Amino acid sequence: MTRAELEQELNGMLAVSRGWALAQTSWNATEADDVLQASVLKLLDGRARFDGRSSFRTFVFGVIRQTARERRRRALVRSVILLRPIARDELAPRELAHGEGAPDARLDHSRESARLVAALAQLPARQREILHLVFYADLTIEEAARVAGVALGTARTHYARGKQKLRELLGDLAHAGDANV
C-alpha cells in the first residue's frame, strides 16, 4: 500500500477511528485525540505495517487499541515513579449536541443517547468493547475478536451476553423512566 493510498484510507476512517479511540480512553476526548494522532503517525512512518492478514479497518483499530494501552501503561509507570494517583475519567452519560431537527426531537434523541451510554457503562469492559466494534465500527464479530485480541468463540460469547444485558438494562431504564413521568 502506497503512502497516498494509506493516507486516503485513513482519512476515510477518521470519524469511526476517533470513536474507537474515545472508547479506548474512557471517553476522554483529549486523550483520544492524542491516541489517534500517535496511531496515525505509527501507520504513516511505518512503525505499524499492514500485512493483509486482516481487513485494513481491523488492523487500524488494533493499532489504536495498542497505542491506548501503551499510553495507559506509561501513565501508570509515571504515576508510580512520581508516587501520585492516576486521574481517571469514568464513562458517564453525556448528552450530545445535535445541530439539526426540532428541539423536542433533539431532546428525545439526547435522552435516548444518555440512556444507551448509561446502559453501556454498566456492561463489563470486554462486552462493551465487542459491542462497540460490531455496532459502531461496523466490524464482523471475527474482526472484532482480532482487534480485541480474543478468540472468536470468546468474542461471540461477549457479544451475545452484552446484547442480552443491554436489552435488560434498557428495559429496566425504560420502566424507571416511565415511573418518573
Image (cartoon, helix red, strand yellow):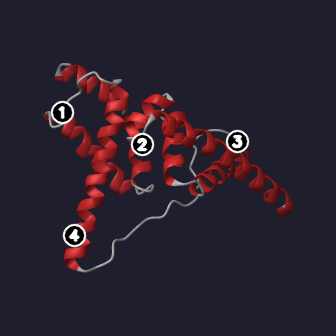
| Label 2 to label 3: alpha-carbon separation | 29 Å
- Tell me, yes or no, if residue 138 can be seen here: no
Q: Is residue 70 above or below residue 139?
A: below
Residue 24, x across and y down, in percent: 40, 50
Q: Quadrant of the C terminus?
A: bottom right
As shown in the figure, which amino acid type bears the numbered disc 3?
Ala
Q: Which residue corresponds to the image point at 26% horizontal and 65% vertical from the top-left?
A: 75
| Label 1 to label 3: alpha-carbon separation | 42 Å
Residue 175, x across and y down, in percent: 82, 55
Q: Quadrant of the N terminus?
A: top left
SS for callout 2? helix
Q: Is residue 146 above or below residue 4?
A: below
Residue at the disc numbered 1 = 44
As shown in the figure, which amino acid type bears the numbered disc 2?
Trp
Residue 11, x across and y down, in percent: 32, 29
Residue at the disc numbered 3 = 102
As shown in the figure, which amino acid type bears the numbered disc 1?
Leu
Q: Which residue corresponds to the image point at 20% horizontal and 21% vertical from the top-left?
A: 4
| Label 4 to label 3: alpha-carbon separation | 48 Å
Comes first in the chain, label 1 or label 3: 1
As shown in the figure, which amino acid type bears the numbered disc 4?
Arg
Q: Is residue 40 left or right of residue 160?
A: left
Residue 78, disc: 4
